Every structure is written in structure tokens, then in C-alpha cells.
Image (cartoon, rainbow, N blue to C red):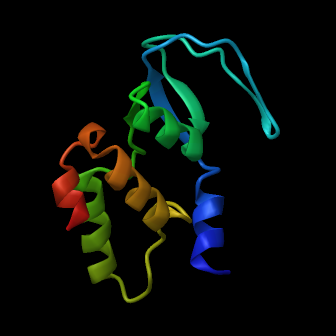
Amino acid sequence: MDTVEVEFLSKKKLMTIIPNFSLDKIYLIRGDLGPLNPSLTMEVPLWLAVNLKQRQKCRLLPPEWMDVEKLEQMRDQERKEETFTPVPSPHYMEITKLLLNHASNNIPKADNIRH
């Protein structure tokens, strides 16, 4: 599988957002979403979350594993083990890249995560 296919698949992952607008139900091929209400969390596919964020229509909540302390714990655990430790998400690299590129202002300590 090439990188374009992997990135495409990663965009299907659900992401939690907090919209700042109202919208009735959205009818998509993979299922209906909504309604979206201001200040109420909602899970949407990553591609939609990034699109809404780019248009300043929502705030993204990063996944639980995208926390500096948790990432450091995973790194330390992997250094101690002789075998590989499980990755936080099958598409963690693509998700991280998209979120840091398009929503870094919604990610605490985004600069530390980059490094």
C-alpha cells in the first residue's frame, strides 16, 4: 500500500470536534452525521474535522494518545522492552501529521509532539 492510500484510510478515523455553528443532519455515503450544535462535542471523520477546522468552524480535540506525557511513557516503555510495543493507532503518523499541520493551535504542547 502506498502513502496516498494510507493517508486516505486514516482520514476515515473518527475525531472529536466542538463545532461553533449549527447544522442539521449531514447525509454521507458512510452514514449520517449530526445534527451539529455549538459547544457540543461530536465525532466526525478526520477529513471532515480538518475541513471544518480550516474554515474555522470547529475546535478539534486531539486523540487521547496525542499527549506529551503519554507519548513519553510509550517511548520509555519501548526502550525498556526487547520487543516492539503497540502503536497508539494504526494510522498514528498520518493522523499526527494532519493534526499538527491543520490544528496545532488546538493541541497542547504541539511543538513538543513535533519533536
* Vertical comparison of 47 with 111: above or below: above
Which residue occupies 27% across, 81% down? 79
Foreground of the two, 28 or 60: 28
Which residue occupies 44% across, 82% down? 84
Q: Is residue 44 left or right of residue 33?
A: left
Q: Is residue 46 left or right of residue 76?
A: right
Residue extending farthest to the front is 55
Measured as percent of width and height from the top left, residue 100 is found at 32, 53
Measured as percent of width and height from the top left, residue 52 is found at 49, 32
Q: Is residue 88 left or right of residue 72?
A: right
Quadrant of the frame with the C terminus: bottom left
Quadrant of the frame with the N terminus: bottom right
* Vertical comparison of 85 with 53: above or below: below
Which residue occupies 65% across, 50% down? 12
Which residue occupies 42% across, 13% down? 39
Measured as percent of width and height from the top left, residue 35 is found at 65, 14
* Vertical comparison of 13 with 29: above or below: below
* Vertical comparison of 110 with 81: above or below: above
Foreground of the two, 24 or 55: 55
Measured as percent of width and height from the top left, residue 108 is found at 22, 42
